[in-house]
Amino acid sequence: MTDARPSPTAPLDDPDRDRVVPTDGRRLRGERTRSAVLDEAVQAASVHGLEGLTFAPLAARVGVNKSAIAALFANKEGLQLATVARARELFAHAVVAPARQAEPGLARVGELVRRWTDYSRSRTFVGGCFFRAAETELDARPGPVRDAVVAVRREWEGYLGHHVALAAAAGDLDDDGDPAQVVFELDAVLAAADGRSVLLGDPTAYERALRAVRAQLVARGADPARLG
């Protein structure tokens, strides 16, 4: 993948998004190095922030020359943008892809929420949700990296809101004409669970979040028997 920015033409749940295209040996080695660097970078950024990413420590941890990383990403902003894109891929793999087993609409909403709690609980990123941390770090810092994080946030909310709207259209949720409000409330609960788990080490945070989401959906007309 050469473009570090999220692609507007590849939806969050596109199964071909991460398909590897065969290439020559030198480019393949470069892609392997790039992948190893980004796998390290997303974990480091989840703890120390995107501003904390620098070439030398990453090179030491991955076992490559600093110049190799510079050749791959050009500058710090290029590395940050590529790190956001890799975090998006990992998030989609952990949350969105497995949730496709559920039927579109209410069942998909419930499965997305469960997968999100699993993603945070299992520490896909060692510092908790990568994007929650990045949003806090970058919320008042305009620029391409913030724009990339915002794009992922809007993509996720749009996808979740789409399935809320499908549930309302099917009569599984009250049709109040405002899926964005449901998404807002669900997101607030999930963010609180991640924060309590990471900061406070609260072992009950995710179960409390799932109960809160269930109560929110039932209050909006969902059949409890369909929520598992």
Image: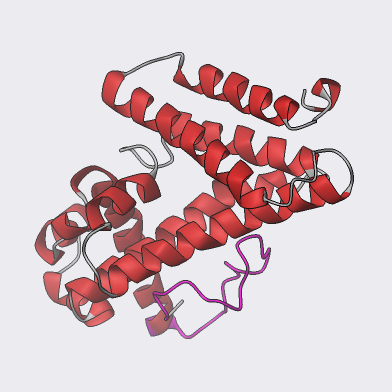
Using the image as rendered, state which of residue 143 and residue 60 is in the foreground. Answer: 143
| Above or below for 134 versus 112 | below
Residue occupying the point 46% across, 29% down: 121
- What's drawn in magenta, residue-wise? 3-26
- The answer to if 28 sits in the magenta stretch is no
Report x, y in % for residue 29.
Answer: 37, 74
Asked whether, in this view, residue 24 is left or right of residue 101, the answer is left
Residue occupying the point 41% across, 63% down: 150
Asked whether, in this view, residue 103 is left or right of residue 95, the answer is right
| Above or below for 80 versus 219 | below
Asked whether, in this view, residue 16 is left or right of residue 104, the answer is left
Our reading of the magenta stretch's main secondary structure is loop
| Above or below for 99 versus 198 | below
Report x, y in % for residue 169.
Answer: 85, 51
Residue occupying the point 36% across, 70% down: 147
In the figure, residue 25 lies in which quadrant? bottom left
Report x, y in % for residue 87.
Answer: 42, 56
Residue 161 seen in the current view: yes
Q: Residue furthest right?
A: 170
